[in-house]
Each structure stands twice: as structure tokens, then as C-alpha cells.
Amino acid sequence: MDQRLTVSDITVDRDRATVSLVFGDGHRCQLGFEEMRANCPCATCRGRRDQGQPAWPPAGPHPPLSVRDARLVGAWGLGLTWSDGHATGIYPWESLRQWCEAGRPSFPADSGRGS
């Protein structure tokens, strides 16, 4: 298995509003809640972005964003349940690694979030 595409540690820091990842090869990365939620790879969020609407944040005032739950999805990704109730996006390890290296989201077309 490619150690670059496995994750050995995940930390959800609710105080700092970040998700930190350590990949199998030791590469470390930190992503912010808002950036992750705005780039959710699910079909619903992709559809909103395709229509020129943001996936997040909603219009008008809203409470601060947080993660209610984080779970492994098989051996290939991370599922997050957000404080706004959204929970359908799965962030594949490979896409998270590419995001970390490129400094911008990178999801394959079949993930719900095109590159």
C-alpha cells in the first residue's frame, strides 16, 4: 500500500477549527473547517457550486461552523458531520493528500467535486 495515501493520525481541533492529518510517509497537513465545508465533495454541494451558489456558508447570519463527528469511511477516506447537519461528503485520502500538497482542493470527478 502506498504510504503517501494512508493516514496514520487525524486530529479534529475544535478550538482551532482545523483537521490535522499525518500521512503514512510522515507528511503533515492542516485544513480549516470552513475551507473543508465550502469544498465538500458530495453531489449536493457540487450541484450548488455548479449553479453558482456556495456550498457553505449560508446567506445571512449563521452560528460558527464546527465538526460534530469524524469517522473513517472504509480504508479510503474521512467522513465529517458538520454543525449545520451536513454529513454526506467523503474526503478521500488521495484527494486530501493532493489538497495538502497543492494548497487547494483536488477531487476526482467521480467524488462529487471536480478538480
Image (spheres, helix red, strand yellow):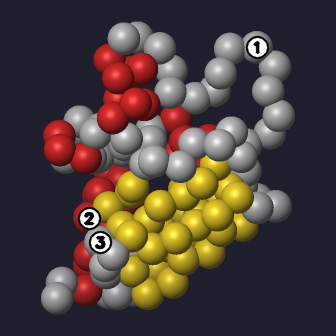
**Residue linked to disc 1:** 60
Which residue is rendered at x = 33% and y = 35% of the image? 43
Q: What residue is shown with label 2?
A: 94
**Residue 13 position by quadrant:** bottom right
Q: Nearer the viewer, residue 78 or 104?
A: 78
The reply to whether callout 1 and callout 3 are in contact (CB within 8 Å) is no
Residue 69, by quadrant, is bottom right
Identify the residue at horizontal 76%, vertical 61% (top origin): 14
Disc 3 element: loop
Point out the image quarter for the N terminus. bottom left
| Quarter that holds the C terminus | top left
Asked which secondary structure carries label 2, the reply is helix
Packing grade of label 3 (10 A; few <14, some 14-19, many >=20) is some
Q: Is residue 83 left or right of residue 102?
A: right
Say which residue appears at 47% left-offset and 14% top-offset. 53
User: Badge 1, how many Cα within 10 Å: few under 14, some, many 20+?
Assistant: few
| Kind of residue sitting beneath label 3 | Trp
